[in-house]
Image (cartoon, coloured by chain):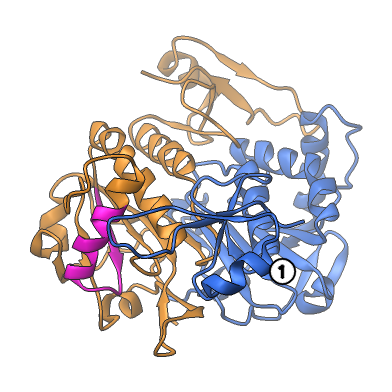
Chain colours: A orange, B blue
Amino acid sequence: MPGIMLGDMFPDFKADTTIGQIRFHEFLGDSWGILFSHPRDYTPVCTTELGRAVKLAEEFKKRNVRMIALSIDSVPDHLGWSKDINSYNSDEPTETLPFPIIADPKRDLAVKLGMLDPDEKDNDGMPVTARCVFIIGPDKKMKLSILYPATTGRNFDEILRVVDSLQLTAKHSVATPVDWKPGDKVMVTPNVPEEEASKIFTCGVTTKELPSGKKYLRYTAQPK
Amino acid sequence: MPGIMLGDMFPDFKADTTIGQIRFHEFLGDSWGILFSHPRDYTPVCTTELGRAVKLAEEFKKRNVRMIALSIDSVPDHLGWSKDINSYNSDEPTETLPFPIIADPKRDLAVKLGMLDPDEKDNDGMPVTARCVFIIGPDKKMKLSILYPATTGRNFDEILRVVDSLQLTAKHSVATPVDWKPGDKVMVTPNVPEEEASKIFTCGVTTKELPSGKKYLRYTAQPK
């Protein structure tokens, strides 16, 4: 089965979307990107997910992340369903969302990108798209992915949290510990020698003593 | 590149671990399973992650989920590092954790299961394991996966949340909406006809009116 791994160049493709035909890499430009698929238009969990994505569009924009959704439905269905999404959000029920949705009715992209959920079938017995999230860096490489089944709605706070971590750690020699949230302390990465750490991280570095005597558990304040 | 998709039978394999050699499917038995990889022993983020996993072991056990970790380090390194993990948790610094760690020094499993992070290299210039999570059902099929890079520690609350969703939705004709937490309302799945929904969900079903006039946004209380 196909699958895009961390560090792989994310495939470029042409697609029909709610804003017309696009080429994916051109659409992304120099930005970060998030491509997220949902099983079907006019279904319950997907509506709650896209509703939340609409509400968070400003947060993604602030972080220079271009959003694009995908399912196996047609452009007219996407546009009709967008009215429901806006209405669910108690907004004016227009056909416009702050991001495009790709129409992949022949499942060409879903197969190519490994996005199908074989446990969920449509009325014709064909598998539908899973709840995938691909986060793509400005270098067009895959940085992170999640793959949830149709039954399990995603957690958009977690998606924003990992975008913050990816962007912070792309810029500074730090990594974010388990359950990290923006503003929490971060870890100095192992490739920074002890004598350099205190020069780079002028707020100070705290090293935890461990039975091994190794000095790898180094905390510092989140760099600005 | 390899990759295990939703619904794929999770490969069986033999592996050396901190509790001796195991066969993976035999280790899982009839339980759910979580296989999670980390880049290296004796590194900062991994220590915070495995420390948190240790603290949550009882929660996974309650849910009948067998836990197993994996990295490209040796069994002696795993055992020595376990002392550091226990010490980080302010526990007695023994070599015992509540779950085994697989030793995959030749990267056989990491390659087979698509777990490598090509952006992170060890001192010999070889790629190390990424932060993968695979959740496997009692039928040995892949239910959900996340794939984070070395820089970004996972969110174990999110992992428990999706286990709760997977187990609930495997048992009842419901799906969990975006950002759902245990106890929140759930959605009636589209395959349940309107006339049956009120019989199955005796606490009542609320249907949201939408511009399309379609009656798919149906909420009910979380089934017990």
Residue drawn 17% across the image and 49% down it: A94
Q: Which residues are magenta?
A: A67-84
Q: Is residue A208 left or right of residue A86?
A: right
Q: Is residue B212 left or right of residue A217?
A: left
Kind of element beneath mark 1: helix
Residue pushed farthest left? Answer: A20
The reply to whether residue A53 is in sight is yes
Residue pushed farthest bottom? Answer: A124
Residue drawn 19% across the image and 61% down it: A79
Q: Is residue A176 left or right of residue A113?
A: right
- Residue A197 is situated, as x and y percent measured from the top left of the image, at 48, 20
Q: Quadrant of residue A75?
A: bottom left
The answer to whether A75 is drawn above or below residue B58 in the figure is: below
Residue drawn 45% across the image and 82% down it: A1
Does A72 lie within the magenta span? Answer: yes
- Residue A217 is situated, as x and y percent measured from the top left of the image, at 64, 29
The answer to whether B170 is drawn above or below residue A86 in the figure is: below
The answer to whether B2 is drawn above or below residue A80 in the figure is: below
Chain ID at mark 1: B
- Residue B27 is situated, as x and y percent measured from the top left of the image, at 83, 72
- Residue B160 is situated, as x and y percent measured from the top left of the image, at 68, 49
Of A198 and B56, which appears nearest the observer? B56
Of B28 and B124, which appears nearest the observer? B28
Of A84 and B79, which appears nearest the observer? A84
Does B82 lie within the magenta span? Answer: no
Q: Label 1, on which residue?
A: B171
Mark 1 Cα shell of 10 Å, populated few (<14), some (14-19), many (≥20) = few
